Image: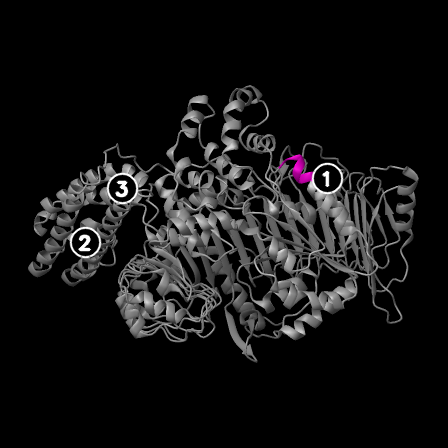
Amino acid sequence: MAMILDAFMSKFSTLLTDFVQDEVIMLLGVKDELQMLRKRMRSIQCLLKDAEKKKFNESSTELWLSELKDVMYDAEDIIDLCRIEGTQLLTDQNPKSKSSSVCCNFSSVFSCFTSVPLRHEIGNRIKDINKRLKEIYEDRERYKLEKSTISETPQITLVDSRQTSSMIDPFVVGREVEVAANSLVDHLIQEKVDEKCRLFAIVGMGGIGKTTLAQKIFNHPKIQAYFNSKVWVCVSQTYAETELLKQVIRGAKRDCRDVNTKSELQHILSDSVSLDQSLFLVLDDVWRADVWVDLLRVPLYNSNKSVRVLVTTRYENVAMDMKAAYIHPVAHLSEDSCWDMLRRRLFSEGQEEVENGLKELGFVIVKRCRGLPLAVKAIAGVLSSKPRTKKVWKNFLNNTAWSIQTLPEEISGALYLSFEDLPSHLKQCFLYFSLFPEDAWLYPHELAQLWVAEGFIIEQQDSLMEDLAEECFDELHNRNLLLPKEGFSKCKMHDLIRSLAIFLSKEEASFGDLNVRNSITSTKLRRLSVIEKEGAVEIVNYVADQGTLRTLLASYSDLLLDDEILRRLSHLRVLDISCTQIQILPDSIRKLVHLRYLNLKMTEIREIPKSIEQLTNLQFLDLSSCRNLRQLPSGITGLYSLRHLDILASPISFIPKGIEKLQQLNYLGNFVVANNDSSSKLEDLNSLKQIRTLIISNLKRLQSETIILKELLYLSTLKLQFFIYEFYYVEEEMAISKENELAVSEEDDPTREEKELAVEELFDRIIPPQSLENFTIDGFFGRRFPNWMVSSSFELCVPNLTKLVFHNIESCTQLPSLGQLPELRELVIDGAKKVKKLGPEIFGIDVNSTRIAFPKLERLEISSCRELEEWSFGAQVEKNASPRLKLLPCLRELEIFFCPSLKQLSKGLKYSNMKILKISSAYSLKLVDNLPAEVEELRLIDCKNLEKVYCAPTLKMLEVQECGALACMEKLDSLQKLYFSDTFKANLPEWILKTLQQRALQNDYNDDFQLELDISLINGYYGLKKKAKLQE
């Protein structure tokens, strides 16, 4: 990833400004040199804007920039090394100071430099940097570089976000797309007796909308009704045959976890399609025909069922090699459609006058997008952050970035301009995406850690740097440089946008391949990714010889590090070798003194060397899911720069003594409570004043009378586990976790009562701060909840709590009063094993008072409560005898799972605004009624004794599975989609037949009622699965 000089030099200059003002600089004798360094940097910064403009057309200017980058990298390394050595000198002179100092504080570090040889070395190095900068500045006249004002790095601000569907972008418009989609759908569902398996192709250049068109078709109502199974697979340039087969099989809802050979998987695929009767398969972004010809064609043909395959590809010859029955070339969007697409993204309702005033300029802008939807999206992302005025749009059209001739055609113009318009701090983050594989999922929290470790994020007062980094991710997404978000906020990047990032960072970064020797000549590679690569050792070996690598991402690769490789990687700041087979971390890891980020997650590592304590710059350490790692070195609590320590799902039995010294720590998962002399104690956590996320396990008994956690003013996420996981392995790969504390909580345990009293006493002393937002209680085995939780002031204790989870609550027979938590939006009650009744006490108020119960609760889940029999909000509430009490006004979703003793839902639910109701494995439930009028989605699964359901008149979606006794369903007039499945029924129930007859009598020709049936005939026959669209 290429250094963004403006951002780097701004950050470095600010750092030097603070540093030079310190009186200890006199001890070093380098104040004048440092002031000169800052002055020359500022002078050179004034030339950067002009140099960046000229670099594409003048190779000499590009060389000047390259030399400047080399100097800046060297300057950062020298200052970094001084900080490390300074910390050690400070410790040697005053051993007590280390625990209270922050090693990245320049003042405290440099004040310890009294060693004459060291001061001399520092001075010489800084003088050398100054000399090189002077030469670079003097070359400005030769390159005719003009000065401009320095733009300060802006505070991070977000563009207004627009929510989009996970599949179809609602702002993609144009009659062309609709017509093409409808035409292709008609071709796809056309039957041919002699050819049950047919392939169709969509072809066109990158960014023209092939995937968008395929998504329209994939979600088309006719496709939904016609095919029993629909599967979407993104193929891309590189793919593993077995993994791709598994994706298709999993998409068809079949299991293939233990099969890893191509032949066996092909047989499973063929059998799966035979059972499903029909399949619609989309193969998106295909680059070669072999994915069809050599891999999928035979098993799909052999199924002898109705199969339609839709392929998107850039190349018509690929479609022809696949013997496509029909090839649809995607045309460029018209200018009218492009303008329609742009205006929908930029103007909201009520802005018609502003929109009309800019329409003429808008058409000039979209003309330059050349009919490419991706380019229109990119331009919309740029303009969304600018004022909607003619002056601004005219200046935008005059931007020289439109006319750079040396860029590849596919990324020139609008796409490059969308990068050029980014603030410099966002440019660094954007270029980092070049290090990830095509179609890789990009997770904000993972990128945030990497960007902080790389030094891209400038600290702001009262803001966590990781949060600022996630805001950068969000802004790149809102500027349309990432595809729409899906679950867990993850995103992907369009391959053309990724190509732009790769092109712009090619001088310093590489997503490695075996041709790296040819692709990297005189370039000093700073960042290398071999993610998911075979032959990673050869690539890394070659690049390591250059001695300049700062970032190595090697997850899921075959890379195994040894002392010899690490010796040549001494400049590394980021090292990710997660999900590799590494078993031994070499002791020479200590030489990576610049390292900020080390990820060993899901490796076979057995031991962390003691020498890791020398990595005093380390900020992020991930040791989660390391099944063979059982102990941490004692020196790990001496890593004073640590911000993130993760040992979740690793069999580590304690955290070494000294956790209170990690003053920068904002994430700790998992703190394992232990009572040995070598471990940190629970009360030591009170010193972690920056902690945001904290997971504690093995909570059993008090270690002191100290109140725990209450003064941690930034703590927002807390998980308390009253057990410790033990890990053992069956065969080779199957990991099984056992909750040993729960195992000894049996009825016949003679110490059970003593243990319960001890854990209750402990929980009384764990009092979260008011900042808490997300709270999980897991495996609590006391008979009562803590005093602070059952008191009337619970809502005052955690006024900002938005999510509360009870999991495996062993002995409590009653839950605390929760109804007055003012910000609670999600409540999960999972495994309250002794709770038999949920009653009005959960409100926490008098039912006759004028109050709101659960004022902001949106989602409620009640699961695995085996003894729960009754759920009632009280007779007064359920008869509406307490009209002043408002109940669940914001509830949107209720899910009940495996509550086998529950006989009836609360009648008080009818006063809520619930939209979605899911009930599974409620074996004692016979009647569902009193539903609120707003319910639109109802899912009933494995409710064996359910006989009758009174639906809401607004119900649109109904799913019924394995409810054999269900004989009556009322009020289905508004139903749009019905899914029914029953393993033991040979005939449709009367209520379905009645519903179909009523629909037929309505004679509504626009009725798009969708019916999906999955009935397994008894007497040993295979299941019969039918889908139909009712259209009278």
In the rendering, at what x and y percent does residue 282 appear? Answer: 66, 55
Question: In this image, 157 relative to 91: left or right?
Answer: right
Residue ranking furthest to the bottom: 731
Query: In terms of image quadrants, where is residue 1022?
Result: bottom right
- Measured in 3D between alpha carbons, the distance from the residue under mark 1 to the one under mark 3, in whole angstroms, is 63 Å
Identify the residue at horizontal 16%, vertical 51% (top origin): 129
| Mark 2: few/some/many CA within 10 Å (<14, 14-19, 20+) | many
Does residue 771 appear left or right of residue 776 in this picture? left
Residue in the foreground of this view, choosing between 991 and 652:
991
Residue 442: horizontal and vertical position, in percent? Answer: 49, 53
Secondary structure, magenta segment, majority class: helix
For the C terminus, give its image quadrant: top right
Residue 303's quadrant in the figure? bottom right
Mark earlier in primary sequence (1, 3): 3
- Which amino acid type is marked by label 1? Val
**Which residue is labeled 2 in the image?**
109
Task: Identify the coloring.
Answer: one colour
Q: Amino acid at mark 2?
A: Val
Q: Which mark is drawn over residue 10? A: 3
Choose mark 2 or mark 1, whichever is in front: 2
When asked about the image quadrant of residue 170, the answer is top right
**Which residue, given by chain and number where applicable, does mark 1 sit on?**
877
Nearer the camera: disc 2 or disc 3: 3
What span is colored magenta in the figure? 173-179
The picture places residue 877, in percent across and down from the top left corner, at 72, 39
Q: Earlier in the sequence, mark 2 or mark 3?
A: 3
Q: Amino acid at mark 3?
A: Ser
> Is residue 714 located in the magenta-colored stretch of the structure?
no
Q: Nearer the viewer, mark 1 or mark 3?
A: 3
Does residue 213 lie above or below 920 as drawn? above
User: Is label 3 in a helix, a strand or a loop?
Assistant: helix
What residue is drawn where x is 90% and y is 37%?
1003
